[in-house]
Image (cartoon, coloured by chain):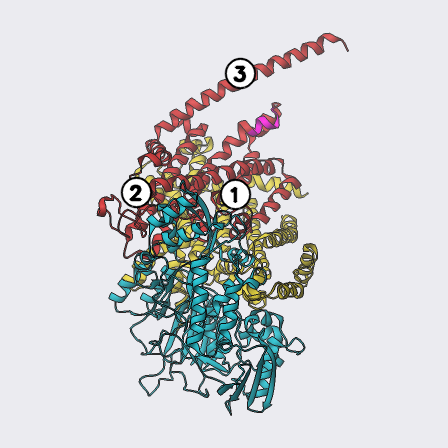
Amino acid sequence: MTDAPSLHGESLRQRSAAELRRENLHIMWRTLTLAWHAYAKDKAAVGALIFLVIVVLIAILAPWISPHDPTEAVGTRGGLPGTDGLVLGGDMDGRDMLSRLFWGGRVSLLIGVVPTVAATAIAVVLGLFAGYVGGWVDQVVMRVLDVFFAFPLVLLAIVIAGILDPGVATLILSITVALVPYISRLVRTTTVSVKQEPYIEAARAGGATTPTILARYVLPNMLAPVIVYSTTLIGLMMVVGSGLSFLGLGIQPPDADWGTMVSDGRAVLKKAPHATAFPGFVIVIVSLAFSFVGDGLRDALDPRARVR
Amino acid sequence: MFRSLRTVALAGAVTVAGASLALGALDTKSAKAEQGGTLIWSIPAAMSLFDPPQSCGWLTKNATHMIFDGLVELELGKPEKGWATLRPALAESWTVSEDGMTYTFNLRKGVKFHDGTPFNAEVAKWNYDRFSNPDAPQYNEVANAYLNFYARWIASTRVVDEHTFEIVLTQPHYEWLQIGQSSCGQPEMISPTAWEIHGDQDIALHPVGTGPFKFVEREIDVMVVLERNDDYYGEPAKLDYMVYRQITDPATRIAALRAGEINMVTEPTWDEIENLVDEGFQLLLQPNVPSVWYAAFNMQHPALQDVRVRKAINMAIDREGVAREVLRGTGKAEHGMLSAGTFAYDPDYNPYPYDPEGAKALLEEAGYGDGLELTFEIFDYGWNEAWEKWMQRDLKKVGIDLKLNKLEWMTYLGKWLQGMPETVAMNSMGWGWSVPYWTAHATRCDHHPPNGINGGWYCNEAVDALYQQAIQTKDQAEATKLYREANRIIMEEDVAFVPVFSYHNPIILAPNVKGFVNGQENWYDYTLPWVEE
Amino acid sequence: MTRFIVMRLLTIVPIMFGVSFFVFILAHLAPGDVTTTLTGPYATEETREQIRESLGLNEPLPVQYGKWLSHILQGEFGKSIANRRMVAELIFPKFANSAILALTSAAMAYVIGLFAGIFAASRPYGYFDRFTIAGTLMFGSIPPYWFGLLLVLLFSLTWRWLPATGMTKIVGGGGPIDVILHLILPTIAAGAAPAAIIARTVRATMLEILSQNYIKVARAKGIRRGVILRKHALRNALPPIATICGLQLGYLLGGVLFVEVIFAWPGIGYQLWQAIQARDIPTIQGASLIIAVAFVLVNLAVDVFNAYTDPKIRISEGVRSR
């Protein structure tokens, strides 16, 4: 063995690594701009995104833009919209519905988005790993997740609440744990399906490393159903969170989130329908918006859909 | 006719159990008009065991005191009286010796359990031994734990003759007999024959008593069905069947009532009551329910060591506002720990009229003019924390930031029984007995956890002495004075509690339910009503 | 394939072991224990200690778990501490009730979800697409305790068409027709969210497939739209769709607590919740186990289905099992 070829080989590898990085950055940037262009084409998705930005802004700015203190009785109990100068009326404790909706967004968005995103991140890692490696690793990971499937969410929340004190953290932790197995299964199934595609084999034959294959080929192809699924879950989780709060495991009175507002008002459906209708409507609209953004994202991230 | 529906063929092969109970067409139509029918009550939570001494809770007592009888029972058919008193049940009459320590019961003759076993003094002693005599083969430690408040006073029991039963107490105690009329641990008689057959554990699944109703079926967490006992020794029940159906959600209970699927609702949403009355449903209230809803101070909490802070909190709560705005007429403001529905109750007692300014001044004096943060542990009772939130708002006005810590019921109960740690300032409860001695349970020095429910660590020997004197006083007027003095010390000198309100137990009935009486307790006499078809 | 199924069925054993172990630990970690209610408020600490002793609650956790396990291996779920009923007697009927509701809800969700998803995907980005998807989503994201009550308000209280609560009528009820009538509203309430999730997943997966080259080739060859949808697209979209459908069925089989509470449906979710509230460990264990078995079987069924319908997966499983 002489020195020259090996030196030559090393520098070649170094160069190609640096180039690869540059190239990757370039591709990423191009992908992002392309994705944004694709996303911008979908008017519903853009509208939904703008709506969500506004909702988030309202939640952040709640202390400054709320007309009243959300925990203070300012009107008659269950006052209909317009009474006592309250645009959306009062709840059953005479508190301003509008201010409570503004403030409620803070908690609701948190318990809708954070567990879903966290669980999706964990699930993507687990599902990709299990699905791509396959064999007994796949079996072990998926069977362990099967164990978590059957976990009673309420029991988990009671334990966490007992250790941490009930609060938003309890909700986020318990919901995250409960969500992981669901999303993981979807990721894994899609990964297994994508793994068999000829282009993966071609890439592997071309010398692509496993991380590259996962990041460049498997992940993008698997994201479509996962994003769609996760964004649907956000709205549902806002509701699940309120269910746990109702059992005394989450949000502490007098704070409120939208789900809890609906659940508090459900016993007076006839007398004060607005007490459930407004927060319920907000949940539905925000869930819809998340779903449309999810659809837009899916299309934007899918190279083939972009071409269309 | 009763038809037990164990299996229903659905779509070929699926079996439906759980919803197993369905009453067939009632072909036993009664000739009498004021008679018969099925009363279906939606109970808001699960019932406990159907073995009286091992049973705990208001809900359960509603069924057990219909299946089983004690020596005596509460008269719950006279709702206009200020408090419920005892009346004969399995004992036709009873006498108390001059020293107040020996109780002699003349038992009713010819009474048979639902399984045919005759009732006599032997059976009475057998039942009392079950929870009070550790040497008896039927002794049950859970029963003893529940009935501790009753059994601890018993020195001995004796069969005098077939129909005479005698109990000797460890000291004179004139409230002792009525103390037994509470819901957590019930000294009522079960059939020893049934116990022999089913064993000490499973007897709870096969309740056999002497009461006006017989047990038919219990589907755990779904429903309980009782039917009239036609061989009852007393005035027989009018209803054919009594059904307790578990419906947890308040909105669902109201929906089921409106749909005609049940005909009795307790714990209605307060804001719906008016509408329901307008729709023709009946509303029954009872102003003398023996329980008070209160917050207990933690006497070991650093900020609450100062009596001025505790006083200020009492002054800052607008209790009338709670009764008017929150309870919507289903309760009234309470200012003392002696609850309504007992002989010692003083309706005019009011040491702390609503005075936020005075409260502020007191807090200022105590050095909390800049504010104070306190934690209030509460539990989920299905009332949306309505009164606790009201307290929170009232206290905010005087500069106290009250942090509500709502806990799931069992978590709460576990913590409550351990007593408050220094970090918790107050916790909440609603409780009482039909005799004033209950207050002693919440305040006596020797009732500090883990040996009792005095979780706020309150202790005053002088108060304990007053209780001791009161239970040995035969004359109720004299005893009343002692209790009121104890209450005055607790509320005005030591300021250990924030009593807030008493609840009037609103009951909503379908228009065709007749004769129902909302008695002075949290359980009712189901022999009185009937349902028109 | 048979080997694959047998292997998977065998994995149920360790899963049961895992579920019961974790649930056991959790149940013991939960604050408050069963003696809190078993002894009442007036008991002394001494009696409480005695009762813990006689219930075996003072033994080390591994010993307690071992005992429970040895019973379970003999097919005994044990006895409920809270109500003395045999756990098996308690949970199997409740599970059957939940299964009935789960199957009808899943059936509804599948039909609505598949049709809505496929139709939406067949004319993507059109009004029909938007309307269908938004419609299913709206019903899917209404909080169930509100949706359920609205259904009751309309169908039971206003129009008086359907019963509001329970599984049968209390007086004079029973029989399949009575049960079916009681099933309708809970089915709609429980099936709405799964229907929305399935519809969106079907639409997304179909769109994904429809943009593949072989579909374009097929289209270029002049094959009719409907045939492409049915024969080419749907078949290839099946794995993720089946997975989602399985997940939704599994979720429903676990007992839809909110729906069971609102309609007073005597299901396993409600039973488990009550047992948790009572810290009734044998019942919690039994109910969790039965739910776990249901999940595992549904997931297994989906995997088998996928292996049969997806030729690519079939090959790989075949290779693996050799």
Where does the image place residue B423, in percent across and percent down from the top left?
Answer: 52, 47
Give whichever of A98, A71 is nearer the camera. Answer: A71
- The answer to whether residue C114 is visible is no
Residue A186 versus residue B199 in the image, above or below: above
Say whether disc 2 or disc 1 marks the residue closer to the N-terminus: 2
Marks 2 & 3 on one chain: yes
**Colour-to-chain, yellow:** C
Q: Which residues are magenta?
A: A208-214
Where does the image place residue B296, in percent across and percent down from the top left?
Answer: 47, 57
Q: Which mark is residue A22?
A: 3
**Which corner quadrant holds the C terminus of chain B?**
bottom left
Identified at 40% across, 31% down, the residue is C220
Q: Chain of mark 1?
A: A
2 or 1: mark nearer the eye: 2
Residue A210 among those drawn in magenta:
yes
Q: Chain of mark 2?
A: A
Residue B21 versus residue C149 in the image, above or below: below
Residue position marked by numbered label 2 in the rendering: A98
**Amino acid type of the residue that numbered disc 1 sits on in the rendered structure:** Leu
